[in-house]
Image (cartoon, grey):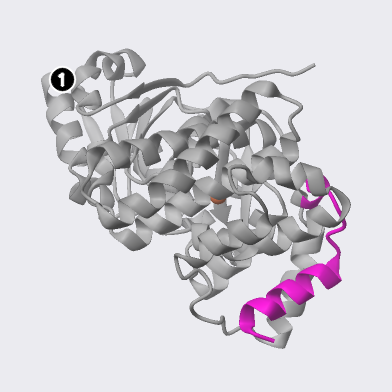
Amino acid sequence: MWRYFLPTRVFSGSGVLKENAGLLRETGTKAFIVTGRNSARISGALDDLYEILKVIEIPHFLFDEVEENPSFDNVEAGKRALLESECDFVIAIGGGSPLDAAKAMAVLAKNPELSCKELYGGSNLMALPVIAVPTTSGTGSEVTPYSILTDSNGIKKGFGMPSIFPVLALLDPVYTLSMPWSITLATALDALSHSLEGEIVNSAQNPLVKMLSKSATEIIARTLPLVREKQDDLILRERLQYSSMIAGMVIAHTGTTAVHAAGYPLSSFKGVKHGMANAMIIPSVFERIALSSPDTVLNAIKPFDNLEELRKFLDRFDIWRDKLDISDDEVLEWSTQSERAAHNKKTPGVFDRDFYINLYRELRGN
Ligand SMILES: [Fe+2]
């Protein structure tokens, strides 16, 4: 038995915003635009949106203060601005940070008595409708019910509820052309991580999820080396955007594994980009899974023939170029946290504290 649920309407292609202006009008009467400092402007998405909102006569309020790895305080500031603005729908433009922050703001605005912390209680809360316009190709947040935020102790954690599936995902590959190579690489590796991890969790039980993850892994493996050589190729950019979205559809059903849990401290405390952190960790986690479930791993990593090939692929992008400066205390603290993460329950094999201690020591070179 299997199930699939995705309430997000997805539209893709060059000029998709202008072509679908009517859908924005259907969603609400005043738009709260959520973005970071740069990507919405540099990509051209914000200018396009302003033009469209003017034509369809929808007033708007701009909140452009989303940080990388948005904190609870950052989201609470957005909540206050959203409530004061009296907007009735949210348009998120950017990478995972603005999209995830916007989702949390949309729930908090609908439930103003709650704080960010209380989003993690497991309740299914209502939210304002969110429209997602991604400018990176990795997070998949445009089609997931998740939001990953950073708490007051600097720890990244995610919450999920059906109401934060975006109502609409508008994917224009043109908006991803301005991504520098470092962001293109990190976000694509996040998407690869989603498809590989999702298939480990799925273990071929859900044929639709399997089809999506297989396709996403293949496209990323084939396309990423080509994009490095031709970064202004719109067709290649479109393929990456598509693969990232379908990898998002995968984790919308499976969640992520020990790879994500172990990677979060590297981003929170060492500034490693989320996708790069995942890529550094994938081989070790998959080698561990292979100890107990070798066939599951071989199935999940196709088209890579084996883990050595997957490692070589990642090595082509200098994933392990710099050894991380991680103290003994950090190794122990992060290992305790990672061992407690709910992600381990979904990951086949034994992921105890010793595993994580060895993993973090390996990443620092001893
Ligand atoms: Fe991720």
SS type, badge 1: loop
Q: Is residue 328 above or below residue 43?
A: below
Residue 360 colored in magenta in the image? yes
Q: Is residue 74 left or right of residue 134?
A: right
Q: Where, quadrant-wise, is the C terminus in this rendering?
A: bottom right
Q: Is residue 169 left or right of residue 287?
A: left
Residue 45 visible? The answer is yes
Residue 123 colored in magenta in the image? no
Q: Is residue 110 left or right of residue 302?
A: left
Q: Where, quadrant-wise, is the N terminus in this rendering?
A: top right
Front-most of residues 318 and 306: 306
Q: Is residue 14 left or right of residue 252?
A: left
Q: Is residue 193 above or below residue 6?
A: below
**Residue under numbered circle 1:** 57
Q: Position of residue 229 (x, y in %)?
A: 28, 56
Q: Position of residue 305 (x, y in %)?
A: 64, 49
Residue at (33% x, 19% y) in the render = 28
Residue at (15% x, 20% y) in the render = 57
Front-most of residues 305 and 191: 305
Residue at (32% x, 36% y) in the render = 238
Q: Identify which amino acid the numbered label 1 is placed on.
A: Glu
Region in magenta:
344-366
Mark 1: few, some, or many residues within 10 Å (few <14, many ≥20)? Answer: few
